[in-house]
Image (spheres, coloured by chain):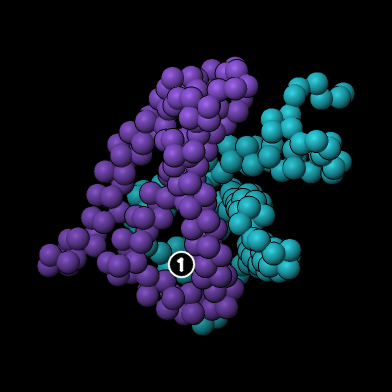
Chain colours: A cyan, B purple
Amino acid sequence: MSLALDKPRSPRRPAARRGNGELYSWLFMRLSGLLLVVLVLGHLFIMNILDGGVHKINFAFVAGRWSSPFWQFWDLSMLWLAQLHGGNGLRTVINDYARKDSTRFWLKMLLYVSMVLIVSLGTFVIFTFDPNISN
Amino acid sequence: MTSAGAPERSGTTRGGGTLYRGDLGMWSWVAHRITGVLTFFFLFTHVLDTALVRVSPNAYDAVIETYKNPVVNLFEVGLVGAVLYHALNGIRVMLVDFWEKGAKYQRVMLWTVLAVWVVVMIPGFYFMMERTISNLVGGH
């Protein structure tokens, strides 16, 4: 379907065709944001208020929590969605403020490397967690 | 829509004009970006510290122990405040985008976001700082 609306600040030449990537990323921010509202606010509420905050947290606490597949799934979903949501947000920020092409390229490479690192490390830890690991 | 010849500063959003720069809506967007970026960097650290459970209980407990002080506790309240604003304003952004009356009520919704934020953060601050404050004033 072709777009029939006048483009605001319409340029003289038509915009370059770039596919629908930005549309999907825009939609993804809304959908993941909606899920993250529940996952992250729930996480913060349980950790900081119901379970008594950082004073209660130690290895045994984590072991007790991850003995339940429900919390493993919760934390895994939160990890993936938050990294993709936050990474996509930071990508937008970099695109907006980086002035030189090379700066933009390297900042985004750094961002993507950190996203891959955090998602893989977090996923690995959740799946291979061992409550009986020795000191 | 305003006519093509209308000056740029033809009014605020309240007057049905098109001015966005310097308006409340712009500041909500600025705050959304700042809280989002802060949360991203926190998340980076948080996954790294939690990953220590895979190293050893001692390594994890040692790092978590360094978080158990009033300054870090205050940062936690700040983090919760940032995430809560980001979540509430994110819902507002979705309503502006998908609800037919969203744009019309964007200002009212921003004030609602700020009101809900204050209402949640007051007891939130109390419950998150309770232990720290009672320790500081000579509790257990």
Q: Which quadrant of the figure contains the N terminus of chain A?
A: top right
Q: Quadrant of residue A21?
A: top right
Give the tally of numbered discs. Answer: 1
Q: Viewed as shown, does residue B125 lie left or right of B136?
A: right
> Picture coordinates of residue A102 (x, y %)?
73, 68
Depth order, front residue of A5/B129: A5
Tell me: A4 left or right of B45: right
Residue sitting at x 41%, y 55%? B79
**Residue at 68% across, 67% down:** A103
Task: Give the residue at x 73% y 63%.
Answer: A101
Q: Is any part of residue A52 visible from this angle? A: yes
Answer few, some or many: residues within 10 Å of disc 1's Cα (few below 14, many 20 plus, some between 14 and 19): some
Near-viewer residue (B112 or B67): B112
Q: Amino acid at mark 1?
A: Ala
Does A8 sit above or below residue A47?
above
Chain of the residue where label 1 is placed in the rendered structure = A
User: B20 above or below B39?
Assistant: above
Please identify the residue farthest to the bottom as the structure is shown. A135
Give the left or right position of residue A112, taking residue B58 as reference.
right
Instruction: Look at 86% across and 24% down and name the residue there.
Output: A2
Q: Residue B76, image x and y in percent?
A: 37, 59
Q: Where is residue A53, by image quadrant? A: bottom left
Q: Mark 1 falls on what kind of element?
A: helix
Q: Position of residue B83 (x, y in %)?
A: 45, 48
The residue that disc 1 covers is A60
Is residue A127 visible from the viewing direction of this image?
no
**Relative depth, front residue between B79 and A44:** B79
Query: Residue A12 falls in which quadrant of the image?
Result: top right
Report x, y in % for residue B12. Answer: 44, 26
Front residue of A44/B53: it is A44
